[in-house]
Image (cartoon, rainbow, N blue to C red):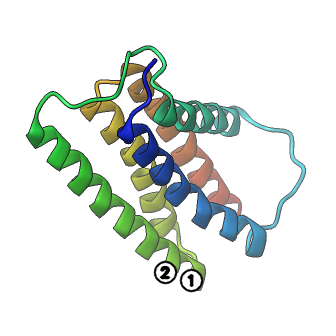
Amino acid sequence: MVLNLINFIQVAIVWILIIPELLFAIHKEKRENKKPDAASVTEQFGRYASMLLMVLPLGIWEFGFASSEEMVIYFAGNGILLAVYILLWVLFFKKQSFGKAIVLAIINSAVFLLCGILLRHWFLVVFAIIFAIGHIAVTVKKFREA
């Protein structure tokens, strides 16, 4: 396993995804000790596996792109997704809505999926899909209960 610049960029991406969620959990969200259901277990399993695979090239020798065009798509795509993600979090902090929550869940999953596809990190793609299914299911359930 070889670590390179992409690993450190991926660490930054993971932190950008985590920080708004941590801030929201600290300031807004009411935590209840509920027994975890299948959706929340799937979400957390997919989330932590995706974050680990974003940083460590497990199953591949090193991160890299097949072409310079893929590198441009990687940086532009992640830049746009993360900018929209941060903007939506700002709006979500002001007024929560189901639509914003679903879009946040989709963007979060799309970042993992985009990185996995462009870096040909197929384990990351699989766990990004698992995370997407669980995260969207938990988001829908949370708003149905509210």
- Left or right, 66 with respect to 97, comes to left
Residue at the location (58% across, 54% down)?
139
Marks 2 & 1, CB-CB < 8 Å contact: yes
- Left or right, 135 with respect to 128, comes to right
Amino acid identity at mark 2: Leu
Residue named by callout 2: 91
Crowd class of label 1 (few under 14; some 14 to 19; many from 20; radius 10 Å) = few
Residue named by callout 1: 95
Q: Distance between the residues labelled 2 and 1?
A: 6 Å
Residue at the location (68% across, 69% down)?
23
State the residue lying farthest toward the right: 33
Q: The C terminus appears in which quarter of the rendering?
A: bottom right
Residue at the location (59% across, 56% down)?
18
Q: Position of residue 130 (x, y in %)?
A: 50, 30
Crowd class of label 2 (few under 14; some 14 to 19; many from 20; radius 10 Å) = few
Amino acid identity at mark 1: Lys
Q: Quadrant of residue 84?
A: bottom left
- Left or right, 29 with respect to 97, comes to right
Where 11 sits versus 104, above or below?
Answer: above
Q: Where is residue 86 in the image (x, y as percent from the top left)?
A: 45, 70
Q: Position of residue 137 (x, y in %)?
A: 56, 44
